[in-house]
Amino acid sequence: MDFTSDVVNIAVEELSKLPGIGKKTAQRLVFFLLKQEGESVKSLAAALVALTERVRYCPVCFNITEQTPCAICEHPKRDRHIICVVEEPNDVLAIERTGEYHGLYHVLGGALSPLEGIGPDNLRIRELIKRLQDDVDELILATNASAEGEATALYISKLTRDLGIKTTRIARGVPVGGDLEYTDEVTLARALSNRTEL
């Protein structure tokens, strides 16, 4: 016999649909929320509703935005001759935090993964190729260092080979503050092959 409220069960069920949240964690979150003041829970609910009502994908780069086009695509000082290709919107945030990149972006919406049924038609590759017709000098492939990310970068580089656009891949290597003895072999090999002259 279930002694919990139907509302509690529904909340647990909905929270457990989030990535990385199992039933037990969802249940802990629900009981945590029940202990909070009503206003803070209402504020969270309002923020979640606003996400679905106001946030959308930029029709140009497919980053998340509240305006059309997004602030990056619309910014007059961004270098329009360089496009950095990433898998997801959170990758844009990571690159922007560095303060080193001042070009435009293109968010693919994932990476090629035949095992999960994700092929080129499931990503925004066609839209990327269309954007490359507009006076682009360099395409930076900043997909993840996973098998899927590497396959995606290779696929795009083959597609763009005949367009006369410089195509580069972000370097991979040993993280700042990292010890060589704890660095995996693939990362060390990549760091050695991408070494620079001092």
Image (spheres, grey):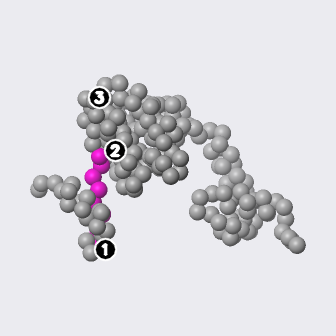
The image position of residue 194, as x and y in percent, is 21, 54
Q: Three-letter amino acid code at disc 3?
A: Leu
Residue 73 located left or right of residue 67: left
Q: Quadrant of the C terminus?
A: bottom left
The image position of residue 70, as x and y in percent, is 48, 34
Magenta extent: 169-179
Mark seen at residue 182: 1
Question: Magenta span has 172?
Answer: yes
Q: Main secondary structure of the magenta part?
A: loop
Q: Quadrant of residue 44?
A: bottom right
N-term mark: 3 or 2: 2
Q: Quadrant of the N terminus?
A: bottom right
Mark pair 3, 1: CA separation: 41 Å
Please tell me which residue is depicted at 28% across the width and 30% down the height of the picture: 162
Residue furthest left as drawn: 198
Residue furthest top as drawn: 134
Q: Residues within 10 Å of mark 1 (few under 14, many from 20)?
A: few
- 36 lies above or below 124: below
Residue 165 located left or right of residue 51: left
Mark pair 3, 2: CA separation: 15 Å
Give whichever of 112, 91 is nearer the camera: 112
Question: Magenta span has 177?
Answer: yes
Could you say whether the residue bearing mark 2 is in a helix, strand or loop? helix
Could you say whether the residue bearing mark 3 is in a helix, strand or loop? helix
Please tell me which residue is depicted at 51% across the width and 31% down the height of the picture: 59
The image position of residue 46, as x and y in percent, is 69, 48
Q: Three-letter amino acid code at disc 1?
A: Tyr
Q: Which residue is mark 2?
A: 154
Q: Residues within 10 Å of mark 2 (few under 14, many from 20)?
A: few
In the rendered structure, are the residues bearing label 2 and label 1 in contact, judged by CB atoms less than 8 Å apart? no
Q: Which residue is mark 3?
A: 163
N-term mark: 3 or 1: 3
